[in-house]
Amino acid sequence: MFPSQPFEVTLDELKHLVSPRALEGETMLLNMGPQHPSTHGVLRLLLELDGETVVSCIPDVGFLHTGIEKNMEAKTYLKALVMTDRMDYLNTVGNNLCYVLAVEKLVDLDVPPRAQAIRIILTELQRIASHLVWLGTHALDLAAMSTFLYCFREREEILDILELCSGQRMMTSYIRPGGLWRDVPAGFEPAVRAFLRDFPARIRQYEGMLTNNPLWIDRTRDIAVILGDEAVAMGLTGPSLRGSGVDFDVRKAVPYAGYEQYAFEVPLGSRGDVYDRYLVRMEEMRQSLRIVEQALQRLPEGPVRSDNRKFVPPPRSELGTSMEAVIHHFKLWTEGFRAPKGAVYVAVESPRGELGCYLEGDGGPQPYRVHFRTPSLTNLAALPRLAKGHLVADLVGIIGSVDIVLGDVDR
Amino acid sequence: MEAVREKPMSTVEKAVAALRREFAESVLGVDEFRGQTQVILDRAALVPACTLLRDDGDLRFNRLSALTAVDYWPDEPRFAVAYQLYSLPNRTYFGLRVPLHGQSAELLTLQAVFPSADWPEREVYDMFGIKFLGHPDLRRLLMPHDWHGHPLRKDYPLGYEEVQFSFNHDEIDRRKPYARR
Amino acid sequence: MGVEQKLGNMGVVTTTLEQAVNWSRTNAMWPMLFGLACCAIEMMSAQSAAFDMSRFGMELMRPSPRQSDLMIVAGRVSRKMAPVLRRLYDQMPDPKWVVAMGDCASCGGVFNNYAIVQGVDEVVPVDVYVAGCPPRPEALIHGILTLHAKIQGEKLRDWA
């Protein structure tokens, strides 16, 4: 059923990817296997090493390929939403948002302002949670273990807020076409305010541990430098690109879901090394707090789901009194809503970069083609260029700074 | 007619106009849906069109955002390779689409224009079997290297395993290849 | 452990020996770092300060299979990964146990398609299945404690 042997590669197949010195046996080919503590998932790297220096690096991905895109074609639009959480599993709310924005654009569905504001609050909290995991694992790889424990402590608070709204810590599926699943409970606002109050001190704590730490600077300064145009050409997006000084943040460039109403800055680096990308992400956490504060301040009253009963199920309280509601409910939960023939592309800013959803409908209740343009795939494709010439110990820091999630790469 | 001040053309409109001007016979159509534009191009014109879009001073579409394919089996043309270009200075997206026939699913690689097309093209080859001519390293990306078939094609089965309910529980249990120590 | 099995049941000596060895096996089980996907993040949360798996003896998560006893398969196993998983399982020295964490490892989960192995028990023999998508850290710890209870009940003749 499946291949009986792991992918045994001979040098012949990779001749064009390694330097000529490997063919003479001068350099060593080392497998940094799919199971490795520092590859942040099941990533396999074939390294050509000259002593400790990486001459070339060949990534082998696909160990987490889940067939999500094909599986979504077999489900209705709403049921397929559940699968989007599991792609980039550190940015689950953001994945939901990307897919739902594409569906709403395809069927031309409105979203009430309260739902938009809550979506933004949850997406920004998810961005902070993702950056916390990034910081924890990146620092852990570079031997700063206490940061890992502190970051996960903070993350628990965010996961508690997500659980309060949706019942699930990670795979929330809370953002649905037309708005949200249900309104936020009463404890939501105090919980978010408590988080906003406590978190800035925590960011200062992490920065105090790392930013001016000579060991940290030694391991991250001037490693994997990539600048401006080359970074754009290599396909980098997100903080990896902004660390190189290129100002591209989808939230500012092509605003979506109401981001144009909030004031925030996009931090940029200048040197394009691992240290600058670290600084960019730390500052992004602060800017996310700003956005959450503004959104919470102006949280409008009103419904959280669209009224369009052709796409959004009616509230269950109506089912006892209205025949139309029963018919809509029945239609939506058995067959699902139909989308017109056409293709849309919607991009959002995930913590890793530009996450895009190309959605094509064919008039039926199931998506004809869903493709996710995931940031980790193109960011990882730049890894061979970034790793060239560095030591194996630096490679760990480089992978951490590019912040890939293998679920995102392989889908 | 009075001389009214015309609304300045948006980047997307300028791009469509430039493509129609330079590649008149290759532009097979322009799709506008929900405010997004996709120009349907003949495959021979893809690389020159992208070069024009990237290098033109007005347009400057210097990023390839997305590269994917759609399978319309059993309709012909069977495949359509869809591109999304992005212009950093002008902050706009622009879509291109190249229809391909099932018998001749080949296309020139876009790596010369956008190096970031490397892995997305490998993924399209892996999932659909569309060959990109001139690609330096066209191997499977996501499936195991000795896999047969291209999963995202419409004639490739989902690989669905029958669900175990109580009525067929034992029967499926017998067939399932459980591992031993 | 060959001699004891050949001598057979020696009454109270055997039971005390069983209890002692099983107790020591459960109290310092070292898991292998085998996080694949989303469940790995919940496994990391279980290891972190809020839920703290190290109070159950699992302080160290060894990346090397040769130094670990417990493989927590956390996440979906794709067809490309399955032979790698089997190879790592074979590299673990006896006694070894496997916990299938999450729905994807137990039965394929949400993904019933060409790419995912429908249950990791097609590849390695599993001792405990922990349900959830992803299971809460408390659920994982409950699964581990269930495994401990299972090991406490092991008999001399079943030891590897």
Image: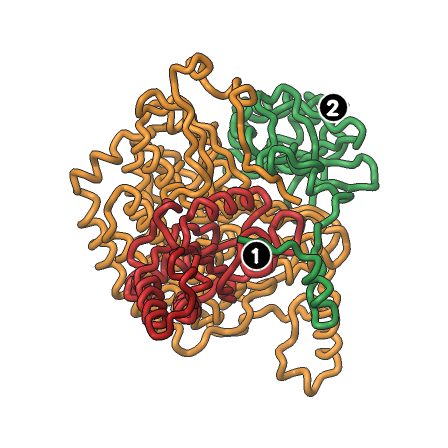
Chain colours: A orange, B green, C red
Q: Is residue C149 left or right of residue A207?
A: right
Q: For marks 2 and 1, give the CA distance.
A: 59 Å
Element class at badge 1: helix
Badge 2 crowding class, 10 Å Cα cut-off, few under 14, some 14 to 19, many 20 or more, is: few
Front: mark 2 or 1: 1
Q: Position of residue A159 (x, y in %)?
A: 39, 65
Kindly tell me whether residue A117 is visible in this rendering.
no
Badge 1 crowding class, 10 Å Cα cut-off, few under 14, some 14 to 19, many 20 or more, is: many
A167 and C18: which is toward the camera = C18
Which subunit holds the residue at mark 1?
C
Q: Position of residue A225 (x, y in %)?
A: 33, 28
Identity of the residue drawn at 78% across and 26% down: B104
Identity of the residue drawn at 48% across and 71% down: A167
C113 and A178: which is toward the camera = C113
Whether marks 2 and 1 lie on the same chain = no
Q: Are marks 2 and 1 in contact (CB under 8 Å)?
A: no
- Which residue, given by chain and number where applicable, does mark 2 sit on? B24
Q: Position of residue A74 (x, y in %)?
A: 71, 55
Identity of the residue drawn at 47% across and 55% down: C73
- Which residue, given by chain and number where applicable, does mark 1 sit on? C121
A268 and A239: which is toward the camera = A239
Kindly tell me whether residue A313 is visible in this rendering.
yes
Q: Could you tell me how many numbered marks the image carries?
A: 2
Question: The N terminus of chain A is located in which quarter?
Answer: top right
Q: Is residue B13 left or right of residue B91?
A: right
Amino acid at the residue labelled 1: Asp
Identity of the residue drawn at 18% across and 38% down: A215
Q: Is residue C154 left or right of residue B76?
A: left
Amino acid at the residue labelled 2: Ala
Element class at badge 2: loop
Residue B47 figure quarter: top right
